[in-house]
Amino acid sequence: MLLGLEEVVSQPQTILQDVIYWTGGQPFLTQKLCELITEVAFETTTGMITLPLGTEALWVEQLVLKQIIQNWQSQDEPEHLRTIRDRLLFDEQQAGRLLGIYQQVLQAEEALERESQGAGEQGSRGAGEKSFPLHSVPSDDSREQTQLLLSGLVERHNGYLKIKNPIYRNVFNAQWVLRQLDNLRPYSQTFNAWVASRYKDESRLLRRQALKDTQNWSQGKSLSDLDYQFLAASVECDRKEVQMALEAARIKEVEARLAQEKRTALLQRYLLVVVSIGLLVSSSLGMGTFILYRQTQKSEIKAKNSEIQALVSSSVGLFASNRRLDALVEAIKAKKRLQKLGKLNINLAPQVENALQQVVYGADEYNRFSGHAAAVLAVDVSPDSSLIASASLDQTIKLWRRDGTLVATLKGHKGAVRTVNF
């Protein structure tokens, strides 16, 4: 090939290096690109392509883009790129998986390309072997990777999958892969929107019948990892929504049951009145009335016991919150209600006595003064400590004795009084 290029280009060694960069040494593409260079040379008047030094790489790049990559399907003669395409898409059951693996390889190389852009295009070609990013695809002996390797599109390199050459990478680029995957997926629109949201928009996931149809469609197919992630997320989201719907239905059922029980209880009360009237006019039902009376009495006692227990708990809580006067009031209420019960229940007596003793022996009462219609902003005590002055947002000043008795109210202020001094 070098001998052939020497006859048609001015820098054959450099041109051949650029050709091999684009073809990766692939025999068919290398021969085709050399033939294209020869054809271009024959079209010149001298039969020789003379290029300024340093422009060889750009010239070869423009030739590759124009004669091979752009409109490649119509220019692919003899057929080569279309054969690779057909090998990828021939088996519809496996196409999604093959495209998914290739998409990962493509994304890894694009990431690597972005990392090395600063080195310059020519420098990067001669810089030796490139390291692979962490998200590169390790090679294995799986059936899908084997089929992808047999297609000729990728090769093994240092334990990872690598696209064979830049021509393949530019022809079968990210846009081409997305179009093919969209053609395969019946859910491509929602899938792409979910991916665009960085896998966070749950409104784009499949549900109900759409999910069932997609699961049926996916049976027997080998999809990409991202497709399986999308379907798994859809299943989980659908499960949660079904669970929430069932929970809502259960709550609604419980509410309906409670409503029915309330209606039944109301009806029972009416029936009780009727039965009571019947018992008054019929001595034969006296025993039944007595039993009903005992049940009612027990319910009342139980309710009163619960009320006493609540008062005791309230007293203990108020005492712990340093509201000891309020705690004393609650304890006294509990004691009075217990006295009304008499000997019907003696189990609560110790609790009531303990609560009452606690607040009686531990309560402190403080003098209070109240009467302002708004918040108090300032307070001052007279030099002889006999009076207290308070200033408030209600535009007044009030004078108090030490025991909380109001002495006077000073009005006429045009706004809130924020300070007061004797």
Image: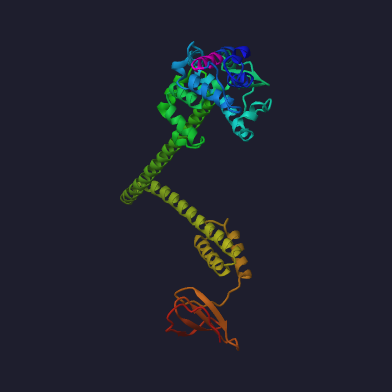
Residue 154 position, x and y percent, is 59, 18
Residue 242 position, x and y percent, is 45, 33
148 in relation to 173, above or below: above
Q: Which residues are magenta?
A: 32-45
Quadrant in the rendering for residue 249? top left
Q: Nearer the viewer, residue 403 or 420?
A: 420
Residue at figure coordinates x 48%, y 82% from the top left: 397
Residue at figure coordinates x 63%, y 22% from the top left: 14
- Quarter of the image with the C terminus in it: bottom right
- Quarter of the image with the N terminus in it: top right
Residue 389 position, x and y percent, is 53, 83
User: For the stretch drawn in magenta, what is the main secondary structure?
Assistant: helix
Colour scheme of the picture: rainbow
Decide if residue 324 is in sight here: yes
187 in relation to 39, above or below: below
Quadrant in the rendering for residue 157? top right
Q: Nearer the viewer, residue 362 or 88?
A: 88
| The magenta stretch spans residue 206 | no
Residue 191 position, x and y percent, is 46, 30
